[in-house]
Image (tube, helix red, strand yellow):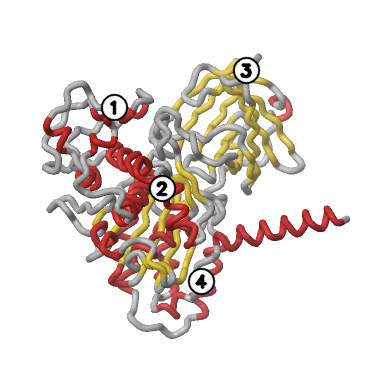
Amino acid sequence: MKKALILSLALCLSAISLRAQVRELPRAVPEAEGVPSEAVAALFDSLMALPRTEIHSVVVVRHGKVIGEIYPKPFAPEYRHTMYSCSKTFVGAAVGLAIDDNRLRLDDRVGAFFPELLPDSVSAHLADMTVRDLLTMTSGITPDWNMRSQTAEWIRTYLAKPVAEPGSKFQYDSICTYLLSAIVQKVTGETVLDYLKRRVFAPMHITEVDWEVSPEGYNTGGWGLHIQSESLAKFGLLLLNGGNWQGKQLLPAAWVKQMMTEHHAGTGYGYQMWRGEYPDAWDLDGALGQYVLIVPDKDMVVVITECTLINGINQRKLVWNRLLPQVADALLPANAKAYARLQKQQQRISLPLAEGKASSPRAARLAKATYALADNAYGWTSVRLDFDKQSKTVALEIGGKDGQTERLLFGHKRWLETELAGFPPYSISPVGCFAGIDRPFHAAGSYGWTKADVLRLKVHYVDWISSLDLTLTFSAEGLSIAAKPNFTNAVETIGGTLE
């Protein structure tokens, strides 16, 4: 009895901790912070209507309070998200801390931190490359985005490349940030993640966070941060307020100002972050549409996580041109009707479910049949389906080259979640990717029969970025799967034969 009580208490405390983690920022009615509820709702509607875009979260903050947020189902506040190049700004903050701790200087030579990895002949330009050059993306080395996928020796390979005059030409490169991550670890004795956990994340109660680790043992820096959307909003507020969090100066104010200063005319780039299109705004910006928009003039932060195949300027323009012009300097009259609509929208919003019927006359004959698959990009070797007509669910068992079997569940006109044994699809393939990321991952699926022999499956990897649209077409000869991930326009057709 005593053990059961202790266990129950522990579970309750765990649940309370998780809720606190995702709802620590105060919430407010938009009008109380000078923003019309209609404007927030219109922003959400417009973002959801963008073509070739799946919105995963949007958080709107004014005066330090969340005035609107959506997590379209099957996404939820608790899920972490991979942030691609938004990660760079966190590395920029860590560099500033190391400089403030007198462990690092902007003019320190990069080569001095990696003497054992330098080429036999060190050019004058390589010798001149500094920490400042890495921060401003002016290393002098032409980016090679495939390098991280072709070798485990990222630093040695990078430093062996031809080097033009450092500081002269802006060339955006994630490996510049990776080198900064390695340098911070060299001078502090901690990974960038652990350093930030101790100095920044812990005081802000950001606990649900991890970061990919390279084959060389450093946080990947230029990508790979895995974090919740509300924690992104907190970090945006930290920068908005000059490094101050609830009265504590966690980052040097002068360094934050330098991060949000353009250092090479015409680049729009500060120290690991971008100038926004709105006056005095600055952005954390990641591939496939990850944004933390910082707007000092309006005392606002807007977080967007998504997977989009259109130019992200469209998303940002919706914030700049539709939301911000309606923001007032004083509180607005209450509008109960508009706020009620916003609340309903936030509660009900969902990504599209798979279209189609709940059952097919062929389902019974197809049940538990195993299909051997041709070679494919996902490493799938076989699939097997189970159908439950009563509960309107489909189970897809996928065999992999590693011998593991993944079982995904799909609901009709609803999402069903599955805990994964393996990894979600990823738009990049660095050597050792996913190392350092806390597991397990999760997937949510829905299904529909569009024809008697055609089954549509939609699966979102809800604590990552990826989704798959799968169209399974059955025939007497076997099975054909058309697989389309959300991070590319390409569709792969995978043939399958009955075993």
**Residue carrying label 3:** 476
Q: Residues within 10 Å of mark 2 (few under 14, many from 20)?
A: many
Instruction: Give coordinates of residue 118: x percent, y percent.
Output: 24, 27
Q: Amino acid at mark 4?
A: Pro
Image position of 318 with respect to 334: above or below:
above
Image position of 321 with respect to 217: above or below:
below
Marks 2 & 1, CB-CB < 8 Å contact = no
Query: First in sequence: mark 4 or mark 3?
Result: 4
**Residue carrying label 1:** 117
Mark 3 lies on a secondary structure that is: loop
Mark 2 lies on a secondary structure that is: strand
Q: Amino acid at mark 2?
A: Thr
Looking at the image, which is closer to me, 422 or 468?
A: 422
Q: Residues within 10 Å of mark 3 (few under 14, many from 20)?
A: few
Could you tell me if residue 319 is visible in this image? no
Instruction: Give coordinates of residue 358: x percent, y percent.
Output: 67, 41
Name the residue furthest right: 1
Q: Residues within 10 Å of mark 4 (few under 14, many from 20)?
A: few
